[in-house]
Amino acid sequence: MPYFKKYFYCFVLAFFFLETNLQAQQLARTADRHNYTSGALIQERPQVKWRFQTEGQVYSSPVLYADKIIIGSCDSNLYALNKADGSVFWKYKTGGEVRATVAVDQQVVYFLSADGYFYALDVHTGKQLWRFKTGGERSYDSWDYFHSSAAVESGIVYFGSGDGHIYALDAKNGKEIWKYKTAGIVHASPTVTAHEILIGSFDGYFYCLEKNGDLRWKFKTVGEHYFPKGEVQFHAVAADSSVYFGARDFNSYALKIKDGTGHWVYHQPGSWISVPSLAGKQLLLTMSDSYSVLALDKVYGGKLYEPRIPLNTFSSASITDSAAYFGALDGVLYKLDLSKGTVSSVFQTASSKLNRSNFFDEKDKLRTGLDEKYAHDIHKLFTGYLQMGSIFSTVWIDGQSLYFGSADGAVYALE
């Protein structure tokens, strides 16, 4: 065989091996939602490498697969962007907003759309391979920002639906393997371990299902005066023998995966617990109305530190060896120093630069009179916050780069 043919053949084989052996990529990087990246080299003040503008708000989080950043938009499109320059490889139009984050495995992209269909696309071309019809999507309230993001593991794709079910589909052909009915909307994303599917529902229960769809146990949250159901809105994180999640009853729960018995509970007065992430022995919790990020001892649930931020956070923190990155409703990307427990801002969206002063004064405090300005309607106020290019995306970290979307419709790459 001539040398150039031999080397070309080896290159093709190496590329094929790389493509077919990439680990499944999904929200928070893995099916157990650990969201940890080792060896990241993020600059103190990363700059915009590129910015891509969609035609709708972006709540979805980016997923990196090979050279593609894949992310959905409320313009009903799923986009595959070149991670180097933000150019479009392909886009796929659905019949509804794409608020879920994709899972990618074996060169197939899996995601849920607000049109009530769950899609599987070819990662290279964006061509539809199959789609599955659920009972339909619906919104719980104004703060129900996300749809369930799929987890894929061992040839099965799992997700929740607005029709109240948790689904398991054959990843190859979309055939339903099983579904489990809850009593509420399921917009939390499933957390998958070696033997369990762990997921909460707006009915206020947290469920542990066997891989065959049978219920092992379910846990009822305590509930709270204004939120008596104790709705479980966001995904959990699992580690060792425990699962950690937050609820709208202002509690963070640590349960034993084996039987659902309590490990510990932490109460945060006056604020929903948003999303947990693990940083070694620290459990990091992004918070809603307490305007903070909270670090707990993951074994005993004791508070380690709680630095303040200016506004609510509804995404999870992305963890590196020394820091965690997360965005907030004020359109600012923040960095948490894991050893010092301090927070600093590292980037501000274009819309935040333009509109943040409408909501914050010179001392970085929320302006007085906002309630009157928005006619004492908290729903209108939170809609107003979106003018700041709020960051709902969970940041994807890749080497020196950070990728995320914002509510002004932009997808950012920083470096």
Image: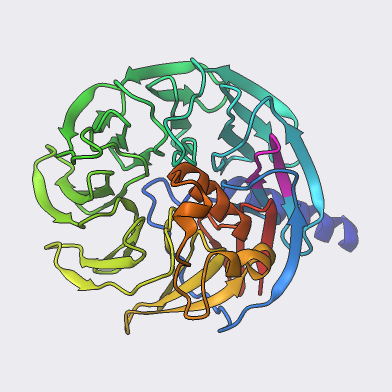
Give residue 188's position: percent from left, percent from top: 39, 38
Vertical placement of 392 versus 218: above or below? below
Instruction: Name which residue lies at 63% across and 36% down.
Output: 108
> Residue 30: percent from the left, percent from the top?
44, 50
Image position, residue 289 (x, y; %): 34, 57
Taking the spot 59% from the left edge, 40% from the top edge, the residue there is 106
> Is 205 left, or right, of 139 in this rendering?
left
Magenta stretch contains residue 34: no
Depth check, front residue: 208 or 357? 357
**Residue 190 vertical position relative to residue 266 in the rendered view, above or below:** above
Q: Find residue 77 and report its image quarter.
A: top right
Q: Residue at x 30, y 41 (%)?
A: 194
Q: Position of residue 261 (x, y in %)?
A: 9, 41
Q: Quadrant of the N terminus?
A: bottom right
Give the colour scheme of this rendering. rainbow
In the rendered structure, the answer to whether residue 354 lies left or right of residue 154 reads right
Residue range in magenta is 71-80
Residue 13 seen from this side: no
* Quadrant placement of the C terminus: bottom right
Instruction: Please identify the dominant SS of the magenta region.
Output: strand
Q: Residue at x 61, y 27 (%)?
A: 119
Q: Is residue 77 magenta?
A: yes
Where on the picture, by quarter, is residue 216? top left
Q: How many marks?
A: 0
Say whether residue 366 is visible: yes
